[in-house]
Image (cartoon, helix red, strand yellow):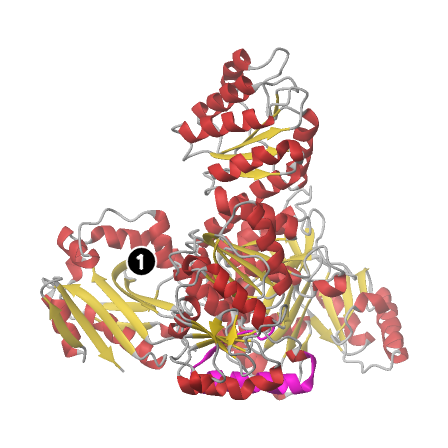
Amino acid sequence: MSQHTLSALFIPKSVAVIGASSKANRAGNVVMRNLLASGFSGPIMPVTPKYKAVLGVLSYANIEQLPQVPELAIICLQFQRITPVLTQLAQLGCKATVIIASGVLATDDGKKHQQQWQDIAESMGIRILGANSLGLMLPHIGLNASLSHINAKKGHIALVSQSAGLCTTILDWANNKDIGFSAMLSLGDGCDIELHELLDFLGRDSHTHAIMLCIDHINDSQRFVSAARAAARYKPILVLKSGGPNAAVAQQDNDIVYDAVFRRAGMLRVDDLVDLFAAVETLAHAKSIAGEKMMLVSNSYGAARLAVDHLNRSGFALADLSADQAKALYPILPPYVVAANPLDMGGAAEVSHYQQTLTQLLDSHQFDVILVMYAPAAVGLSEQIAQAVIQVYLTHPNRRRCTLMTQWSGEDAAYQARKHFNRAGIATYRTPESAVGAFIHMVEFQRNQHLLKQVPTSISCKSPYDNEFALQTIEQAVTKQQWQLSTVDAAKILSAFNINVLKAHVAMNADEAVAVATNIGFPVALKLRDSKLRHHSDIQAVLLHLNNAQEVIVAATSVIQRVQQLDCEFSGFIIQKMALTAGAQEIRVAVINDSTFGPVICIGEGGSEWQPLVDAEVALPPLNMALARYSVQQALNRKVLKNRYVPQPFNIEALCLVLCQISDMIIACPQIEAIDFNPILMKGNDLTVLDVNVTLMPQLYDIASKLTIMPYPKSLESYATLKNGQIILMRPILPEDEPNHLAFDNSLSAEDRYKRYFGVRSAMTHEEMAVLTQIDYAREMAFIAVDQSKQTEVTLGAIRATIDPDNIEAEFAMAVRTNYQGQGIGRLLLVKLIEYYRTKQTKKLTGYTMLSNRNMASLAKQLGFKVTTDVEDGLIYMELIY
């Protein structure tokens, strides 16, 4: 469905209330009261056959009598009566509706009605918010079309919630804090309009500076993550997801996968309403922090200790206070106070102590965040100290670089002080823990943003994969309907992706086992080949350190007997030489198929009771070295992976490389449903898989549709020959291209840069270049022309296009290295882009260039573009309609 139709939802010029009522507490009455009280300037048209007027507004007996087509209709009817009304509205030309009715999905009849509404929305172009929606509020246009008893104040935070109850709870709290909203939308059952559409719209909305999501599920994971990644580059996104770490295990479901998804998309997850309120307070008042160095100032040792303890439990610490800074603080502190961090000034601290201390700390340029705390004291200076702190901070020249946070303890004694901070736009908190929690949120959000812009290390220098051999091996197994592959067969697939597996041999009876063991040398390990049994060790089907032929015979015989007792089919043994485990560490890696997000990689330490979605860190493919490194660090922080004290501790880079290889294998082999590496032996730089089981699925599917994040589209790579005979590679851009792309951009002549950027443009920054190279292949494309003849690749040209969420129009821009112009690179790139968007069934491809760039205009005309000139604006407009 089109983003354009959401304009009627977000910027309606007229509203109809279908089922308006004069009876108090009826939905049609509450919505009318809210609409009239909120100051909406457009027509409000109640529709009801029961009353001549509703709340003093002339009503209409039916939809046909409406004097004009409403842009937005709020339907306050029982769900059994909605289908014909929705059809009428769509036929009339109404573009957006809100369905208030609840309980729709509780019965089969209700589900049938909801399906009918979805069909009407799809076929007739009307958008539906709900059912079971509280409604929506748009304070910037004075619209409150909801059942809420509280109106939202005007602000810059957008609230989108699948829970109606959370909306009113958050609004009640926010009003008390003087925090406003740009929009409040209750998604309800999500009959038509979905989360990803709202994220796309709000990401472009000039009134919205931050987005808050309260969700319990995601329907379309790929579109949701794509929209979230796009919005999160420019606006903070907070997520409160039900079923979090404090929920019962049965309710957690794939909660740890949601954690990984939110981090990967650059969003910040909060665990509960307390955390949410603290984070919203921070969003409303605190700017982005410059770093993680925090200074704490308090008049209470106990309160300061609570804050520090909470900080330490979360894996953080206060910044160090330098000797010079301590020396500068002593003359202005109360007697007997020790200059340290935290800085406890004692209960006798006065206004001047807070003033001078804060000034000195801001002067020092040593801290990124200063948390000022106050606990009720006998001198009773709460309000005066708050006003002094505000005055110092707002007038200090360093306030833009250093973030101030405040925490005033108490209720009545601290109420007015906190009000002063709210009005001054300074974040303030009720408890030490909530203040520290807000700081941690800011740091985690900053880290997630940094991860979005990080330049990953390339692994392209490694020997290439043998995808064809891996796929042939899988096809042979599928032909035999062999869905479970044990170490012997799985090793062939892993070797195609350069993953080292301890060599395994098959023996079908005890005598063969002895022969194999004698050949490879003792000691050996003997394992049951049948991979259908989940844990071979549970039936003692894994026997280690067999030192001679007699021990092998005894072991093999006993395993056969136990298999017969279980009435299982015996398919032989796997014999391996015992790996040298001294000084090594074992880890476990599993690939599972999540019902919502597709394939995910779980990293932990394993064990017979190991649960991947509980005892491991989750990483989402596709991975590169930077993303893998981040996941390993998360696993270490959560202690699901431990860097143990062994003679040769594992090399993180080596582990990251294996994770990237596993990720590439998943993408290249879509029939792999699950993998269990149990264990991987890590010894310094050497990682060896000792045992692995692979599960295949019968059906072949498109991996791009299964993955949450679109992988690099290798199929779009192609070679071409320039006019001078040079062969170049044309391919989609990669995050690893950032250094080369920066060099390419800097190589353009002043004239070419002027044409490319429509004016004088300074050199690109790392952050700007990261946006250009770390693209989302699901919603944009950039092709580059690469010279591979030199030791380091050289970018010769680039073309990119951004597309609207509706896949209607893609707008392109192009540049060619100055000394390579005239060789046909521009034509090759533009033809490749045209064909790409033709395949995607995009409606049209457009672009602008300057009047002086006649070569570009001529090329576009040759390739079928309609070219028009705007002399007044000095631009040439190019349009290709497919």
Q: Is residue 857 left or right of residue 425?
A: left
> Looking at the image, which residue is at 57% across and 74% down?
21
Q: Amino acid at mark 1?
A: Glu
Q: Nearer the viewer, residue 855 or 254?
A: 254
In the picture, the quarter occupied by the C terminus is bottom left
Q: Position of residue 389 (x, y in %)?
A: 51, 27
> Looking at the image, which residue is at 78% across and 74% down?
533
> Looking at the image, which residue is at 47% across and 87% down?
88
User: Does residue 21 appear anywhere in the picture?
Assistant: yes
Residue 670 included in the magenta stretch of the image: no
> How busy is the neighbourhood of tag 1: few (under 14 within 10 Å), some, or many (20 plus)?
few
**Residue range highlighted in magenta:** 106-133
Q: Is residue 583 above or below residue 485?
A: above
Q: Secondary structure at mark 1?
A: loop
Q: Position of residue 793 (x, y in %)?
A: 31, 58
Q: Is residue 463 left or right of residue 475?
A: left
| Magenta residues, dominant SS class | helix
Q: Quadrant of residue 488?
A: bottom right
